[in-house]
Structure formats: C-alpha cells, structure tokens
Amino acid sequence: MKSNRQKGAYYLKKSLDELKKLGYQTTKLETNKMTFIKGNMIFIHTDAFASDILAMDDKEIIFIQVKFKEDGKFSNFNQWVDEFNKYKWPPFVKRELWLWEPRKKVRREIC
C-alpha cells in the first residue's frame, strides 16, 4: 500500500499535468526541509501561501491547494479555506482547492 506522502505526490503530479494540458505555466510551491530534533532527522513540509501549485496563463494567476481522500469525505474543507484566508490576496488572484478522489477529480474555487 502506498503511503500518504506517495499518494500526495501522485495527485500533485496529476494536477500539474492537467494544468499544463489546459495551457497554464506551473510551479510547485511546497517545500520539504530536513531538520534535526533531539538527534532525529525529520522532514518538515511547508506550503507557500497555503498552496501547493502556482499556475498562470495570459489571463489569470491561480494558487492551488491539492488534497485527496480515499473515502471521498473532505471533513476539514473549512480549515483549508481558513488557511487561504490568512493571507491578503489581490482581487485578480484566484485561489482553488483541488479535491481528488480515486478515479475522479472535483474542483472547487475559493473566492
């Protein structure tokens, strides 16, 4: 069985591929930093502006957070929206949550 990290990487790549098909230029905004805590090496995952992907074309800029759920229940949806709302966004910038389920994609736009 794949780990959550592997599943997340799969859906992130799937999102990037779909955006490229739609004509967007993309870059990943998430970073993984290695640090030591009490002598143990751990990885800390951080997102820039609560987003995994920055996508843009000649008409729009979109910050995208990618999530997946095996059972299709996105119970903490409002928590992700709150993360987006911690930042001051210019009115021309879009924010989207891409919510993936196995074998289908749901796209929700956050204003």
Image (cartoon, rainbow, N blue to C red):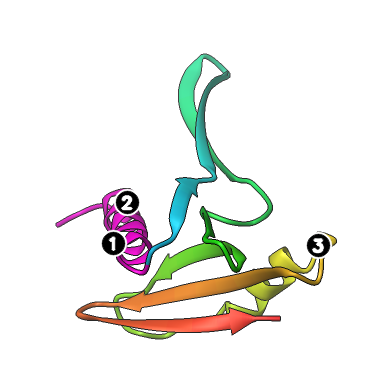
- Nearest the eye: 39 or 29: 29
Q: In the rendered image, which quarter contains the C terminus?
A: bottom right
Give the class, few, some or many, for how many residues have Cα within 10 Å of label 3's Cα (few <14, many ≥20). few
User: From this viewpoint, which residue is outermost toward the left?
Assistant: 1
Q: Earlier in the sequence, mark 3 or mark 2?
A: 2
Q: Which residue is mark 3?
A: 86
Residue at image location 45% in from the left, 51% down from the top = 26
- Nearest the eye: 78 or 98: 98
Magenta stretch in the rendered image: 1-22
Residue at image location 52% in from the left, 83% down from the top = 108
Q: Is residue 53 left or right of residue 5?
A: right
Amino acid identity at mark 1: Lys
| Secondary structure of the residue carrying numbered label 1 | helix
Residues at circles 1 and 3 in contact by the CB criterion of under 8 Å: no
- Nearest the eye: 26 or 33: 26
The disc placed on residue 9 is 2
Q: Characterize the magenta stretch by its predominant secondary structure.
A: helix
Q: In the rendered image, which quarter contains the N terminus?
A: bottom left
Q: Earlier in the sequence, mark 1 or mark 3?
A: 1
Q: Which residue is mark 1?
A: 14
Is 13 a magenta residue?
yes
